Amino acid sequence: MDEQQQLANAYHSNKLSHAYLFEGDDAQTMKQVALNFAKLILCDNDSQCDAKVSAFNHPDFLYVSSNENTIKKEQIEQLVHYMNQLPIESDYKVYIIEDFEKLTIQGENSILKFLEEPPDKTIAILLSTKPEQILNTIHSRCQHLYFKPIDKGQFIKRLEDREISKPIAEMISTYTTQIENALALNEEFDLMSLRKSIIHWCELLLTNKPMALIGIIDLLKQAKNRKLQLLTIATVNGFFEDILHSKVNIDSTIIFSDLQNDTQKYAQNLTFNQIVLMLDQLTDAHKKLNQNVNPTLVFEQIVIKGVS
């Protein structure tokens, strides 16, 4: 049974939860399933009503998203105010929050209070590709729906079909699985130059830590804003995941196809504990960047606490 059918069964059997957390790395599929679920709840196959939801123009529906690194507390306060009103055209009110992990701590706490005491017939649909960054108390208030992992090879092929080179497509795949975000990144920034700087810095991390510390200056000249810094962390994480996969001979999951000889060489020289330690540091670095910690300090900690 696929995810859409599970939700339809819950609706038709009157077993709707007040909050759902969609988890997975296929952001596009989660968004589409969420919109279809909202249409079912609000419209029950009424085509005019469906069109309103698709256009984000239904009075009982609200879709929250952000192109920034965070979803602001003010957006959540507006949502809570809107959802506390009675339905206008439907029996329910439905809201979707895309990239839920982007909420600030204050925003998460506001939603937590709302989830603890939701208005009658109000359905929350929260979407996240990084559920580990969400408060445990939020997890405990939601019914979870787990989506199958997106096939990275297929995603990379989609980007290549849009005339993005394979090395850049591979790099972007470590950061996002949303085609629109990928295309915008590629159009806005010189990703080939950034990729070259990131790979060079990864090599310094493994061969010359003092130079890796010095190299942060040049790296951050390329990764000049939070979005590019997060992309950089994701790319470094992908590089070390490739080393881990080479270590256990799972070549089918290698991300950077043109670096396979290098990652195999590094895999021979590193222990499992060293690789896992670095991946843990990169997870921590990602969280700190999202909390607006100074990026120079974040990258310095990767060098100091990472592979030794």
Image: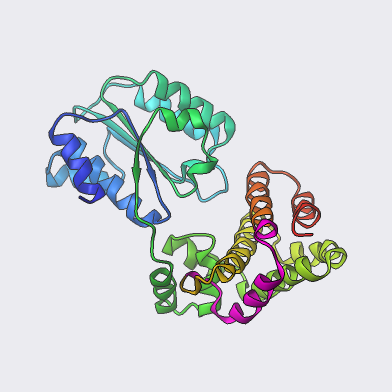
Which image quadrant for residue 152?
bottom left
Residue 136 in the figure: left or right of residue 275: left
- Considering depth in this image, is 257 or 44 the residue closer to the camera? 257
Instruction: Provide residue 188's location: percent of width, then percent of height.
Output: 57, 67
Please say whether residue 85 is visible from this viewpoint. Answer: yes
Which image quadrant for residue 120?
top left
Q: What predominant SS class does the magenta segment belong to?
A: helix
- Report the residue at 53% width, 72% height from top: 249
Instruction: Provide residue 194's location: percent of width, then percent of height.
Output: 67, 71
Which image quadrant for residue 133?
top right
Instruction: Provide residue 278's location: percent of width, then percent of height.
Output: 68, 56
Residue 240 in the figure: left or right of residue 10: right
- Report the residue at 54% width, 65% height from top: 185
Q: Is residue 274 above or below residue 258?
A: above
Q: Is residue 228 above or below residue 41?
A: below
- Considering depth in this image, is 231 or 131 the residue closer to the camera? 131
Does the magenta run of residues contain 260?
Answer: yes
Instruction: Provide residue 300's location: percent of width, then percent of height.
Output: 80, 54
| Residues in magenta, as a range | 253-275
